[in-house]
Image (spheres, helix red, strand yellow):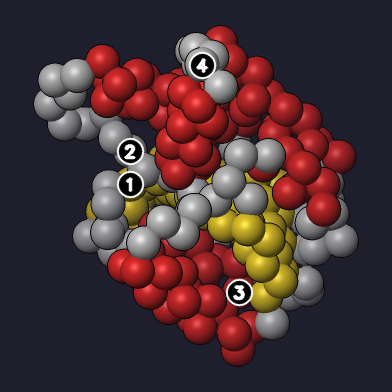
Amino acid sequence: MAKIIFITGGSRSGKSIYAQRVAESISGARTYIATCPVIDKEMEDRVRKHKEARQSASWQTIEEVTDLAEALRRSKESEVILVDCLTLWINNLMYEAEQKKKYLDEGVISKRCDDVLGVCSDLTGTVIFVTNEVGMGIVPENASSRLFRDLAGRCNQRMANHADTVIFMVSGLPLYIKGEKII
């Protein structure tokens, strides 16, 4: 089974940069699984900057917005896989369900997380998951936002429970919640 590192925190807390540093501290082939759909110019610029930041370390990039389990399977030859990020994956699954007029609930998200973790059990090396901690603020005023918060919270709990290491990022600093310090 792959070693699982779970990195969470607020927006712009340094999660992605820290995750990349951790990944690049591990020798071997690296795959970056990007879950962010490019929907506008600003997002296009962000994606470009992320790709440029990984150029010198010989990353393979897979862009996959919904089928995370399959993207992990396609990365099986890598020593380290960085998935950035689970909250965008949840957003994409919600959008897909809405387009298909299906309801997404915590049970479905738990199943999707279990599928991802099942693939991790067949992998060797290290898988790093990045996510946002979205449940620390006010209760959202609309049902869709509350559903997103609940689904992200369920996913984060499921993944953190199975992780070997859990790190909470605060202002660019890692706070180790579970497991041994890595870097």
Name the residue tied to disc 2: 133
Q: Residue furthest bottom?
A: 56
Residue type at mark 2 is Glu
Q: Is residue 66 left or right of residue 6?
A: right
* Residue under numbered circle 4: 101
Please give the residue where the numbered disc 1 appears in the rendered image.
Answer: 9
- Contact between marks 2 and 3 (CB within 8 A): the answer is no
Percent x, y of residue 92: 49, 38
Viewer-nearest residue: 35 or 11: 35
Q: Secondary structure at mark 3?
A: helix
- From the image, tell me which residue sits under label 3: 24
The kind of residue tagged 3 is Glu
Q: Is residue 25 above or below residue 80?
A: below
Residue 40 at what x, y percent from top left?
Answer: 36, 62
CA separation in Å, label 1 and label 4: 31 Å
Q: Secondary structure at mark 4?
A: loop
